Amino acid sequence: MSEPHLHETHPEIVKRLRRAEGHLRSIIEMIEAGRPCLLLAQQLQAVERAIAQAKKTLIQDHIDHCLEGVVGPLPREQRRTIDEFKEITKYL
């Protein structure tokens, strides 16, 4: 069995996802209680943003750490392409 693949940001991602999970449970209760659709949509948007941010953090962390480990040291000219790739992923 391989070692766990953990990064510095993983605890914060887990915390964010646990909050989103609790928020989603409360939205389900709101639906069952017949709360207004506008309120439900707003709350669902908040959960969606939290999950999207967790995904973005995970992907950027992976690129920053795992890609670096595979690529290793490169001459400046070759390094530019990697740096540009890392930069453009911030717009995901």
Image (cartoon, helix red, strand yellow):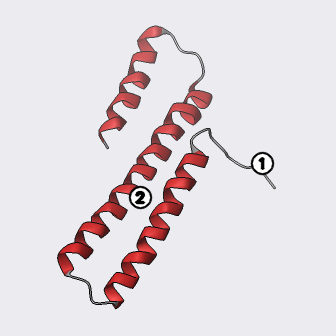
- Depth check, front residue: 88 or 77: 88
Q: Residues within 10 Å of mark 1 (few under 14, many from 20)?
A: few
The C terminus sits in image quarter:
top left
Q: Secondary structure at mark 2?
A: helix
Residue closest to the far top: 76
Tell me where residue 72 appears, x and y as whole percent.
Answer: 60, 22
- Depth check, front residue: 30 or 58: 30
* 39 displayed left or right of 53: left
Inspect the image, locate mark 1, and give the three-letter code of the amino acid beneath it: Glu
* 66 displayed left or right of 43: right
Q: Secondary structure at mark 1?
A: loop
Q: Which mark is residue 3?
A: 1
At a point 50% along the width and 36% down the height, the residue shown is: 63
At a point 30% along the width and 68% down the height, the residue shown is: 43
Q: Which mark is residue 65?
A: none
Inspect the image, locate mark 2, and give the three-letter code of the amino acid beneath it: Ile
- Pair 2/1: label in front: 2
Residue marked by disc 2: 51
